[in-house]
């Protein structure tokens, strides 16, 4: 899904800045390009897992990158990943509020076929159902809990790394992760049971 990310990096919203001449402008341009290329896949996954619908991810990316370009000089070297994720968190929250949970449906089977070399129909169905459950469960988690859960369980970051990334104490990370796991398990079981019941009733 992310393998082709580097080939479709959106145009940098700071094109006016990048057009300037001079050593400082060139240095900023090089740094900006490096940040985008180095963190694009992580940023794409983060926005998607934080509740941004797939068809809206490009717009969300542009928003995050616009903030990045505008505030590049304020970001200390090594803090780029943290800045991007926290910005993505705010953008995702804004877009979720704007959509008011009006999640748009789209043909996920077609997406799977295009990306994975046309898997068998039953494989597409299993992936589609698993993704639907994952999205629905994640969507029910509070955004602060969801962010920690996604970073630990899906991005496989350590507790100290998450604490640094989100600028929160490790103890807060642990408590949010514990809460996220408990709620995830409860909600996932409930959804699976509902789907089995619905399938048996038809």
Image (cartoon, grey):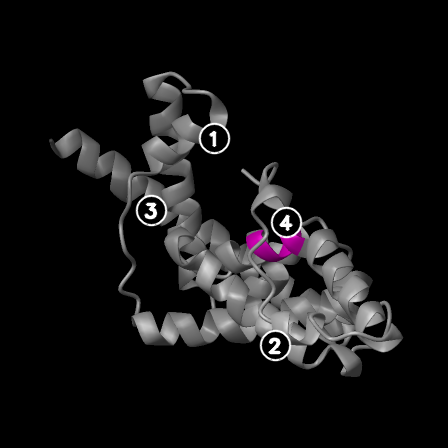
Question: Which residue is denoted by mark 4 in the rendering?
Answer: 41
Measuring 60% from the left and 42% from the top, which residue is drawn there? 7
Residue 68 belongs to magenta span? no
- Residue range of the region highlighted in magenta in the rendering: 40-44
How far from the left and from the top, in percent, is residue 142?
A: 48, 70
* Front residue of 130 and 32: 32
Q: Do the residues bearing badges 1 and 2 touch, measured as CB atoms within 8 Å? A: no
Q: What is the number of callouts on the image?
A: 4
**Mark 4 secondary-structure assignment:** helix
Mark 3 lies on residue: 191
Neighbour class for label 3 at 10 Å: few (<14), some, many (≥20)?
some
Identify the secondary structure beneath mark 1.
helix
Residue 80 position in % (x across, y down):
76, 68
Foreground mark, 3 or 2, reads 2
- Image quadrant assignment for residue 118: top left
Q: Main secondary structure of the magenta part?
A: helix
Q: Position of residue 192 (x, y in %)?
A: 34, 40
Contact flag, marks 4 and 1 (Cβ < 8 Å): no
Q: Is residue 19 in sight in this rendering?
A: yes
Which residue is rendered at x = 26% and y = 64% of the image? 102
C-beta proximity under 8 Å, tags 4 and 2: no
How many other residues sit within 10 Å of disc 1, few (<14), some (14-19) or many (≥20)?
some
Mark nearest the camera among 1 and 3 is 1
User: Between 162 and 169, which is closer to the camera in this rendering?
Assistant: 162
Distance of label 3 from label 4 (alpha carbons): 29 Å
Look at the numbered discs 3 and 4 and tell me whether their residues touch, using CB distance below 8 Å.
Answer: no
| Residue at 34% in and 19% down | 122
Depicted 165 relative to depicted 110: above or below? below
Disc 3/disc 2 C-alpha distance (Å): 37 Å
């Amino acid at each position: 899904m992310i393998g082709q990310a580097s080939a479709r990096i959106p145009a940098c919203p700071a094109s006016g800045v990048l057009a300037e001449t001079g050593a400082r402008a060139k240095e900023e341009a090089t740094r900006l390009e490096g940040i985008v290329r180095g963190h694009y896949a992580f940023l794409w996954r983060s926005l998607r897992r934080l509740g941004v619908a797939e068809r809206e991810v490009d717009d969300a990316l542009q928003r995050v990158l616009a903030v990045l370009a505008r505030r590049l000089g304020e970001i200390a070297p090594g803090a780029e990943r943290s800045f991007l994720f926290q910005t993505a968190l705010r953008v995702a929250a804004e877009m979720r509020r704007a959509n008011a949970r009006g999640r748009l449906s789209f043909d996920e089977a077609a997406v799977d076929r295009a990306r994975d070399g046309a898997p068998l129909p039953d494989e597409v169905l299993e992936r589609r159902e698993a993704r639907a459950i994952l999205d629905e469960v994640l969507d029910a988690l509070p955004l602060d809990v969801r962010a920690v859960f996604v970073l630990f369980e899906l991005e496989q970051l350590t507790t100290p790394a998450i604490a640094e990334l989100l600028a929160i104490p490790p103890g807060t990370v642990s408590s949010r992760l514990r809460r996220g796991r408990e709620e995830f398990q409860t909600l996932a079981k409930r959804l699976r049971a509902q789907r089995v019941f619905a399938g048996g009733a038809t």
